């Protein structure tokens, strides 16, 4: 049988099974030879050969024999270091294979499993635009290491932290770097929600084998906001198996979440365990120096767009101090300032800043909660949160509990009875005694005084 004849047969297969199945399973086949009733095909992977054998072998045999060839069986062989495939001899235009990282189609109905398109990457989110400071230096170093490609000692890399601390920025930066340095790698970046959508789509269309093959064929899998699959049992199970398959193949996995894997409610224990077996890195809330550095970096970027605008001394320092919870809000405030100042033709001084950003400044007033204080104190003293709240009266628990009560009295507007209720239903007199005891110890015990000050700064950062 000639290659031309195989090309004509592929046209018939295309019409019989449809474009999607053809592109995924038939187009990669390379006809090698027909000998003694055995048609030999070269395939990229064993998985593909097995799948075609199970699902399309009868149809291929039928078409071959109808065309006048005598074929009893098909033989699929994985070719080592096989050259690039010639263009298929099919009358219809071939479907182009998407870039490893690409934007999704505008029509969700056309976003097929075969395309395996990733979430779009933001061109602003690169390592060059990422401002490094003490709260994020470990996460940045780990992301840099992974972006070099090649084997790493930690897999997966899990980045976690609150909103606007740089998780997505680092994920995009890794993808850009890998795409630039290793264009041959199949890098897939998508959100956990997109992973779930594709999984549901595969179930609905009864094409789970396609789903499994495609997701297990990537070299680097990046899943953003993995907390969104918590509580979705079937999706978690498939994610777990995908995770295992990629790790077994030494493929890199990078995950982000809004909290540590062990703290994600309704996430299965086996998934938590898998996520925790790599490097888990916390992006801490930004400190003043990092926020100021981010603002200075943004001002440099804006200088080309607003060359005539001047910023008065103290404005950036004021913003870095007042807007402390979210970098996105901080950057958005600066963008608004530049736009407003250019429209009214004024210098960005303190008066214009306070007028323009009155609503942002009000919303950004720091509100510290009792729960946040309890969590910070338990982490600081390396004890469980339940021991802070619980009934144990050992000194190793009682002293941190008193420190937490003291900070609640100093940093929140809660009354003593309210604070007592948050500490396991304790009486307000117990809280009063704890607060008074820490006040006394601060004067006589340097370690307690240092602990309280460190915790206060951390909470107010």
Image (spheres, grey):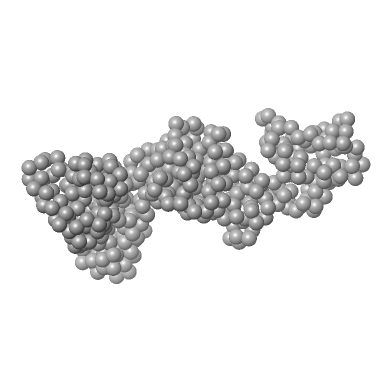
Residue under the image location 71 percent in, 32 percent down:
78
Residue toward you, 199 or 116: 199
Tell me where residue 141 appears, x and y as whole percent: 37, 38
Left or right, 346 with reference to 143: left
Residue under the image location 74 percent in, 48 percent down:
22
Tell me where residue 50 appears, x and y as whole percent: 72, 38
Please indicate, yes or no, whether residue 238 appears anywhere in the rendered image: yes
Residue toward you, 105 or 60: 60
Residue under the image location 56 percent in, 42 percent down:
242
Left or right, 363 with reference to 434: right
Tell me where residue 379 appears, x and y as whole percent: 28, 44
Residue toward you, 263 or 242: 263
Tell me where residue 153 appears, x and y as whole percent: 44, 31
Image quadrant where residue 104 sits: bottom right
Image quadrant where residue 424 sits: bottom left
Residue toward you, 101 or 350: 101
Q: Residue furthest right?
A: 68
Q: Give the quadrant of the N terminus.
A: top right
Left or right, 435 with reference to 276: left
Please indicate, yes or no, whether residue 176 appears anywhere in the rendered image: no
């Amino acid at each position: 049988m000639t290659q031309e004849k195989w090309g004509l047969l592929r046209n018939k297969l295309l019409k019989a099974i449809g474009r999607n199945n053809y592109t995924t399973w038939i187009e990669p086949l390379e006809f090698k030879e027909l000998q003694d009733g055995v048609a030999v095909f070269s395939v990229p992977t064993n998985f593909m050969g097995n799948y075609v054998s199970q699902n399309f072998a009868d149809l291929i045999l039928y078409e071959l024999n109808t065309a006048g060839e005598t074929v009893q069986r098909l033989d699929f062989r994985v070719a080592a270091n096989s050259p690039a495939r010639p263009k298929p001899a099919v009358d219809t235009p071939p479907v182009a294979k998407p870039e490893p990282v690409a934007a999704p189609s505008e029509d969700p109905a056309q976003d097929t499993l075969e395309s395996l398109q990733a979430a779009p990457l933001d061109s602003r989110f690169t390592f060059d635009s990422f401002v490094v400071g003490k709260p994020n230096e470990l996460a940045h170093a780990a992301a840099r290491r992974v972006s070099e490609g090649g084997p790493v000692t930690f897999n997966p890399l899990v980045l976690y932290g609150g909103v606007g601390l740089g998780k997505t920025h680092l994920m995009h930066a890794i993808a850009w770097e890998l795409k630039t340095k290793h264009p041959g790698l199949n890098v897939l970046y998508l959100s956990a929600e997109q992973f779930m959508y594709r999984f549901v789509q595969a179930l609905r269309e009864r094409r789970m084998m396609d789903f499994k093959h495609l997701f297990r064929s990537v070299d680097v899998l990046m899943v953003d906001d993995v907390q969104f699959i918590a509580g979705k049992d079937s999706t978690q199970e498939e994610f777990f198996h995908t995770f295992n398959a990629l790790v077994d193949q030494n493929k890199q996995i990078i995950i982000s979440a809004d909290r540590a894997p062990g703290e994600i409610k309704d996430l299965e224990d086996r998934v938590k365990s898998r996520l925790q077996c790599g490097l888990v890195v916390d992006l801490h809330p930004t400190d003043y120096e990092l926020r100021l550095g981010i603002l200075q970096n943004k001002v440099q970027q804006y200088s080309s767009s607003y060359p005539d605008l001047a910023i008065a001394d103290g404005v950036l320092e004021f913003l870095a101090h007042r807007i402390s919870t979210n970098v996105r809000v901080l950057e958005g405030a600066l963008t608004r300032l530049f736009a407003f100042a250019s429209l009214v033709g004024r210098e960005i001084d303190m008066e214009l800043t306070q007028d323009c950003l009155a609503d942002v400044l009000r919303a950004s007033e720091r509100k510290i909660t009792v729960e946040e204080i309890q969590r910070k104190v338990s982490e600081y003293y390396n004890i469980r949160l339940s021991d802070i709240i619980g009934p144990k009266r050992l000194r190793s628990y009682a002293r941190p509990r008193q420190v937490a009560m003291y900070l609640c009295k100093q940093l929140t507007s809660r009354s003593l009875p309210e604070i007592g209720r948050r500490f396991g239903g304790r009486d307000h007199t117990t809280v009063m005694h704890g607060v008074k005891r820490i006040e006394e110890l601060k004067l006589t015990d340097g370690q307690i005084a240092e602990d309280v000050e460190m915790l206060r700064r951390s909470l107010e950062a």
